Image: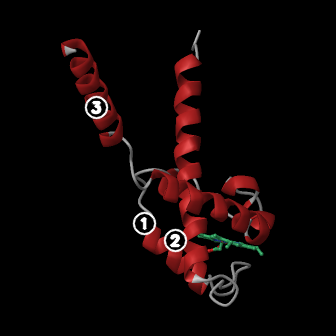
Amino acid sequence: MKLIKFLFLLSWIAVGLAHAQTNPYAERLSQAAKNGEELFGRNCQQCHNSRGKGGKAPQLVKGVWGPGGANSDAYMYQVITTGRPNTAMGSFKGSLSDDEIWQVISFLREEALRVKAAEAKNKDTYVPW
Ligand code: HEC
């Protein structure tokens, strides 16, 4: 009987710990990025290339746009909503909702993390001799 009580207590602690370590926002974040990925494919890819890696238009996932880079989410939002006058970068204010623009930004930020992780991995396996 004591053993059963002990096991019950143990499983209760285990469940509690597992619960404490779940990020309640993780799912919502990646759902936003998933929607953003689709929106990016339909609205931005033709100029910024697949996954924002740059082509006819600048890349959006490295350097100043990379993790910890100088360009903030707010700045990205501003460029997307107002566009850049006298360039091919138009304003998306009319064609994407606020929510959709933030989803695109979430996608690009997540992609930037993936690009950085991939680069770090390549650096590890790089042998200079
Ligand atoms: C018709 C082509 C085209 C499309 C479509 C387009 N862009 Fe651009 N975008 C450009 C060009 C060209 C520039 C560079 C403008 C300049 O010279 O300042 C640019 C610049 C940007 C910049 C600033 C880059 C920097 O480093 O200064 C961001 C952010 C951006 N675009 C995001 C987007 C997003 C997000 C979408 C889709 C919602 C999108 N663009 C769709 C052509 C495009």
Q: How many marks?
A: 3
Cα separation, mark 1 vs mark 2, equals 6 Å
The residue located at (71%, 68%) in the rendering is 39
Residues at marks 1 and 2 touching, judged by CB atoms closer than 8 Å: yes
Few, some or many residues within 10 Å of mark 1 (<14, 14–19, 20+) = some
Mark number, residue 17: none
* Image quarter in which the C terminus is found: top right
Relative to 75, 86 lies left or right? right
Q: Which residue is mark 3?
A: 12
Foreground label between 1 and 3: 3
Residue at 58% x, 67% y: name it: 103
* Disc 1: which residue: 72
| Residue holding disc 2 | 76
Neighbour tally class for label 2: few under 14, some 14-19, many 20 plus, Cα within 10 Å: some
Q: Is mark 2 within 8 Å of ligand 1?
A: yes
Disc 3 is placed on an element classified as helix
Q: Amino acid at mark 1?
A: Ser
Q: Is residue 65 visible?
A: no
Give the quadrant of ligand 1.
bottom right
